[in-house]
Amino acid sequence: MVERTGTGIPPTPEGPVAYHVLRYVPNLVRDEWVNIGVLVFNSQTGERRLRLIEDTEEYNRVRRLHPWADEALLRKLRDELENRLDADSANGAQIPWQRVLGKWDQTLSNALQIAPQRGVLSEDLDGELERLYADHVAVPRRSVRPGLPGGRANIRSYCTQVFKQARIWDRLDKWVRIAEFTFPGDPARLDYSYRRNGTRGFVQTLSVSRAPQEAKTLAYNVQHISAKAAYKTEFAAVTDVALSADNDRHRFVRETLRDAGIEPVPTEGLAVWVAKLRPSLLQ
């Protein structure tokens, strides 16, 4: 078997992957919906990935399409789905996915519908989740170019490109839950995590141009992780634009990150940052 160049990791064979698009239906009579998430799973191994909307711009899009959308209900549904997935996993991977999904249809709110199952061939559940989410759920975006203002979905898409080109994608954890560091039931996640030389690193995307206030939320989460982690930690925030000392908004973000011990990494400098990180991940 041929290994991936420079990584020592054999390639994962391409195989069938099933997925469902999750829809928010605020009014059953009108039969109008908006896609809010994707569930991807391997029916043979039980491995699964779930991603639902979480960014401000994604909720704004739902409200533009459905002005009376119940955001509190949407956030509750996300937590309920996560808890049910965790409970089903704890009960064993032998539970057929069709039975699990059938149980959901019977007990979840009518506002959530699970679209019919579809299938694709893929060797990477994480990569497939990113692609399907971008195609079916994410706010439509222009082509990704580093250094241009954009939302977190744009930044994550570019991060995926850079991580895969550097061949460290398989060395990263994705969508890392932080409830173990904050409070039980906390739905917050960080985009990526890695381990090197006894240190665990966390990477979060941050749209300075669209949601600079999220720097405070990130700083809060980082402080909890640093205080409770039983190992050395390091943090980085990948920003859509470079932080300028002449811009008040940029200074606010830069100082908030600095005080929390978070390194800002603009997308235009991400490839260089990853190149420095890569050797320690491949040891």
Image: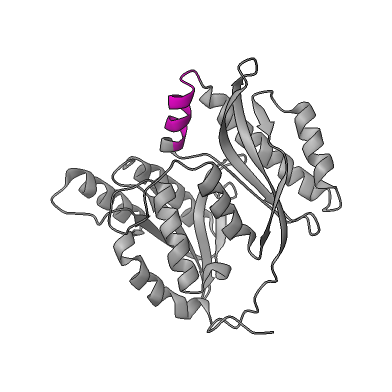
Residue 149 seen in render:
yes
Left or right of 50: which side holds 54?
left
Which residue is more in the foreground, 106 or 138?
138
Q: Pinpoint residue 210: horizontal percent, then vertical percent.
A: 32, 41
Looking at the rendered image, the quarter that the C terminus falls into is bottom right
- Residue drawn at (72%, 39%), measured in percent from left and top? 116
Residue 176 seen in render:
no
- Residue drawn at (65%, 66%), measured in percent from left and top? 123
- Residue drawn at (55%, 43%), measured in percent from left and top? 136
Which residue is more in the foreground, 204 or 107?
107
Q: Pinpoint residue 20: horizontal percent, then vertical percent.
A: 68, 43
Which residue is more in the foreground, 11 or 228?
11
Per the rendered image, the range of residues in magenta is: 58-68
Q: Pinpoint residue 11: horizontal percent, then vertical percent.
A: 64, 76
Looking at the rendered image, the quarter that the N terminus falls into is bottom right
Majority SS type along the magenta span: helix
